[in-house]
Amino acid sequence: MPRIALIDGDMYAFQVAASSQVEVYFENMLCVGADIDTAKHNLDQMIEGFMETLDAEAVHIAISDPAKGNFRKDVLPTYKLARVNAWQPVLRKPMMEHLQDAYRCTHKPGL
């Protein structure tokens, strides 16, 4: 039976998106940007590294279903309440899309 690496797509997409972001101050403005191709490459390298470390032949990415939300909120309604208006990296959504385009992914309601 082949060894399959099961990876938390939400966490690593966020991590790569956040680490790829740069802030540039221009006069009285703060501009935020990121190189999407470099971020995709970094995410792919991370996944390849996991597969190599785990000696995995395949990878499967688990992604939460935003329509259903997180199961923890059903158990504890205040879960991550302080993050409701929290900053999100500019490449978070493109990294999630890249995972879905490049890898076998499963959306799990309430993950």
Image (cartoon, rainbow, N blue to C red):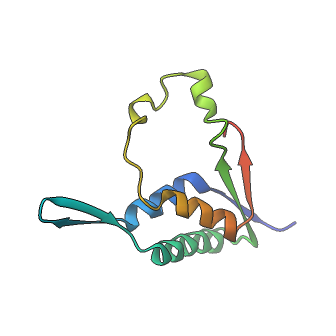
Quarter in which the N terminus is drawn: bottom right
Q: Foreground: 67 or 1?
A: 67
Q: Foreground: 102 or 50?
A: 102
Direction from residue 20 to residue 102 in the image, left or right: right
Tell me the quarter of the picture where residue 84 sits. top left
Direction from residue 30 to residue 13 in the image, left or right: right
Eyeballing the image, is 104 above or below 42? above
Residue 61 appears at what percent x and percent y?
A: 68, 58
Direction left: furthest residue:
27
Residue 97 appears at what percent x and percent y?
A: 61, 62
Residue 36 appears at what percent x and percent y?
A: 47, 73
Residue 11 appears at what percent x and percent y?
A: 53, 53
Direction front: furthest residue:
28
Residue shown at the point (63%, 75%) measured from the top left: 52
Quarter in which the C terminus is drawn: top right
Tell me the quarter of the picture where residue 76 sits. top right
Residue shown at the point (16%, 67%) measured from the top left: 26
Direction right: furthest residue:
1
Direction from residue 93 to residue 2 in the image, left or right: right
Residue shown at the point (22%, 60%) measured from the top left: 30
Direction from residue 71 to residue 18 in the image, left or right: left
Number of numbered labels in the structure image = 0
Residue shown at the point (68%, 68%) measured from the top left: 101
